[in-house]
Image (cartoon, rainbow, N blue to C red):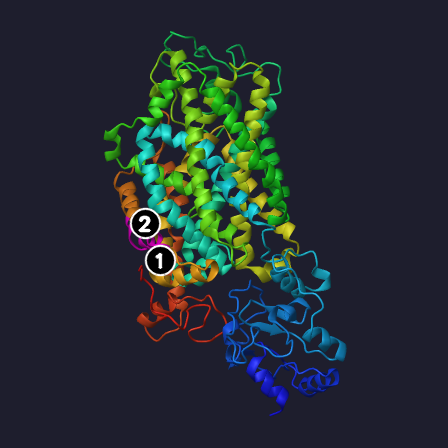
Amino acid sequence: MSKAEDSAEAAAPSVAIHVDHYNNEVEENSKLLGLNAPTPTITPSGQMRKVKSFTDTHRIHDVGAASSAASARCLRPYDKPEANAYPDGSESGTNYGAPSMRSLASIGMGCTDGRKMVIRRVPTSPTELFHLVRPPTPPDEDTASHESCEEEEEDAEDHHLKPRRPFWANKIQFVLACVGYSVGLGNVWRFPYLCYKSGGGAFLIPYFIILLVCGIPMLFMELAVGQYTAHGPIGALSQICPLFKGAGVASVVISFFMSTYYAVIIAWAIYYFFTSFKSEMPWASCSNRWNTPQCWVPHHNLTKPNGSQTPTEQFFEKKVLSMSDGIEYPGSMRWELAACLVCAWVLVYFALWKSIKSSAKVRYITTTLPFLLIIVFLGRSLTLEGANMGLRFFFKPEWELLKQSRPWVNAASQIFNSIGIAFGSMIMFASYNRFDNNFLHDTVAVSLINAVTSLIVGIFTFATIGNIAFEQNTNVKDVIADSPGLLFVVYPQAIAKMPASQLWAVLFFFMFLCLGLNSQFAIVEVVVTSIQDGFPDMIRKRLVYHELLVLCVCVVSLFFGLPHILQSGIYLFQLMDYYAASLSITYLAFFEVVAIAWLYGVGRLSRNIKRMTGRRPSFYFRFCWLVATPALLLALWVASLVDYTPPSYRQYEYPAWAQVLGWTIASFSLLCIPVYAVVVVMRSPGKNLGEKLRNSIRPTLCECGIDSCDICYSESEPPDDKTNIN
């Protein structure tokens, strides 16, 4: 063996070379340049040669059997070399300025994930070899390490294709995306609605308990999984634990259903936004053509008559929705709302058509501006007469209600909806992070902002409700029925009494529109990212342009949302929200924790986190993942089934066939987990069911074909250390 080959065997990066006759030519070029650089060694069969990590560059494994499965996909660097970790005593593991993995990939010779490298061609000229050995300018680590590989993979004619996994341009974009989702419809629309429905103060106690036991630990876990795997929910869970790939599919199904009716809320906001430009607020009086004799304008010390409605209630139900008498009476299409719905999806499309590159820029406005307006409305609401009545209802719990399961189930639903847990949004956002991002800080920041914003929104909502109760001379809990339209009834009534009410109405509904778009961006991005991860080849061949994929998702979701703007649409809206987003979410979250904390293992996940952040997660996180979180989730799921009550809209009771329709909607997500589990077990290798089951829970994070791969386990720690929380 020549000196060049000895050098390559000792220190060269892993390479995959498929042309045997280039060996001699490379050696001659190296001698011609007078360089003692390591030369790639080519096996006679053209098989792939790999190393496990930067710290093991002296150990080359022949894994030709897996060469066909290991694609030239580009991931982020996983580890950084330790000082003096190489046999030759150098810090780089090479001699005389040998090429680094990053430099090889950066000049288009191949692609690296930080642990292994694939070179798709060999230098054939002295100049090309010189640039290979001594790259002129290394790429910027923050932005080019991932996208450069992806760009080289594309042909010149495919330059329009979006890189499969780009980076956030900076940390602020990632935090704004997470905060924008949590401080969206989940806080401003759902939180007041569920809190009012659950008895006010009795809702806050389970809300904060579930936030500490489930919310923060699961958010930290999902960010870790997304950042480590660099995939959306389906791809991440299929690599962590193939048996529960269905949990990732279920989260995407729920996100799709939510995108169809969340867009309807945005359409309502757009309708109110444009209506606010009128010289007189149409919801301020009973003199409009849609008003009925039951319309009653609130006056102080006058009790609200039985069966009467305020102008804001009638505007929402009679004018905006034109409600029918039930879901069995669909009625006609509300064409004004249809136009607003199309407008909503147009806004979503143009914010997402360039993936995070476009949506991140939009969030600079849609996330920051609403915070300013929320503070303004908070100050205004606290000055209203009767605000103390609403605040007392909001903060003073009725302890008897805590014995019921409904406040606990609603609190869990609110936590998951607002933070995005089990919906796939946070896994998807984290998949665009750099590998060494410290997401513990992000977890604390997002959780804290979410909790504080929920309290602020609750304060100004219930202060406003207290003012309405004061004017109507009634109790806070009897002010209005607990319907999804609570926001569109309470706030317009308070705004109508403000000076310059048109200006305040425009600002409020613009704020609400921004918050709704933030939530919708995250939900739709989950669907788009999951389709890209699941069918990359089909997307490139059939749709070609990334913009076409986003367009297809938006158009399909638009058509699924049209039934919600029929005259019976509000009943279907309530049905979807009850079965798709509330009933299924604790079930899905439980199996997600089981897959990651129990089957993949708390110990293994802790090592992954240490590899990314330099620190193992605290005992609090490990205990919650292993014991507290799954126990609480299981208890909530069982309680929701035991105390199940059919949904209702005010006094309207849904017919039996509508409840069957609701359970059918829920089954699309509920059945994903067992169905996919059966399919994965049947397809897993093994001679009997036990072997198939063991193989189905084996992580597939690494595709290199090496047993005990360093990506999956650390050799210094046993691979079967799954549940150690110490």
Q: Is residue 355 visible?
A: no
**Secondary structure of residue under mark 1:** helix
The quarter of the rendered structure image containing the C terminus is bottom left
Q: Position of residue 417 (x, y in %)?
A: 43, 41
212 left or right of 446 in image: left
Q: How many marks?
A: 2
> For residue 690, what is the image quadrant?
bottom left
- Indicate which disc, 1 or 2, sits on the residue closer to the N terminus: 1
Of all residues shown, which one is farthest toward the bottom?
1
Q: Is residue 461 above or below residue 705?
A: above
Pointer 1 with pointer 2, Cβ within 8 A: yes
* Residue that label 1 marks: 597
Q: Is residue 63 above or below residue 137?
A: below
679 left or right of 148 in image: left
Q: CA distance from mark 1 to mark 2?
A: 10 Å
> For residue 201, what is the image quadrant?
top left
Q: Which residues are magenta?
A: 618-631
Q: Position of residue 386 (x, y in %)?
A: 39, 15
- What's the amino acid at mark 1? Ala
- What's the amino acid at mark 2? Thr
Question: Residue 629 got which mark?
Answer: 2
| Mark 1: few/some/many CA within 10 Å (<14, 14-19, 20+) | many
Residue at 40%, 69% (x, y): give it.
Answer: 684
Q: Nearer the viewer, residue 154 or 364?
A: 364
Residue at 59%, 27% (x, y): give it.
Answer: 336
Q: Is residue 232 magenta?
A: no
Q: Is residue 726 visible?
A: yes
